[in-house]
Image: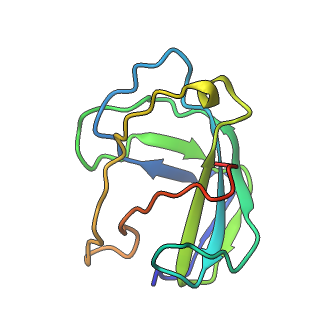
Amino acid sequence: NITPFTIERGDIVAFDLAAVYTGSDPQQIDISFATTSSINQPIIETSSYTQIITGGIPPIQGDTIFNNFELEYNVDVGYSFPGGGLIMRFSAFNYPYGSNRICNQVLNEGIRDLSTPFIFRIYSSNTDTLA
């Protein structure tokens, strides 16, 4: 269970890569959040998705420094998370980056660090073809 949180327009959502992205198109994506009551596969949404970032492009396209969360996206729309399970949907279909079909997973995966309520294991799935 993730603790409740609120993000506002202008806040930053950040991720940590384990490599430098070398593609020709910037990592321009939309990011949406939804709640879930499931912590295993299949993931079942219990709320509709709220798109918090539209066409975000991070100023740095990745690096090899572990745990510095250099891939930063500015939040466009605030979101209040009530706690529990959180789904983050990444979509790049509307941007040139979305046509890049050669994809090596370089996002650092972590198991929850009990010293912070914000780092959890990552699951990846694409059940609705929107992400």
Spot occupied by residue 74 in the image (x, y as percentages of width and height): 61, 45
**Is 89 on the left-hand or right-hand side of 55?**
left
Residue 127: quarter of image:
bottom right
Instruction: Name the residue rendered at 56%, 73% in the picture.
Output: 43
Instruction: Name the residue rendered at 60%, 78% in the picture.
Output: 36
Relative to 57, say whether 14 is above or below.
below
Spot occupied by residue 125 in the image (x, y as percentages of width and height): 52, 58
Spot occupied by residue 64 in the image (x, y as percentages of width and height): 24, 34
Display coloring? rainbow
Q: Count of labels shown?
A: 0
Instruction: Name the residue rendered at 28%, 68% in the picture.
Output: 111
Relative to 44, say whether 49 is above or below.
above
Residue 89: quarter of image:
bottom right
Relative to 59, say whether 11 is above or below.
below
Spot occupied by residue 68 in the image (x, y as percentages of width and height): 30, 46
Instruction: Name the residue rendered at 37%, 69% in the picture.
Output: 120
**Is 52 on the left-hand or right-hand side of 3?**
right
Instruction: Indicate the quadrant containing the N terminus: top left, top right, bottom left or bottom right.
Output: bottom left
Residue 49: quarter of image:
bottom right
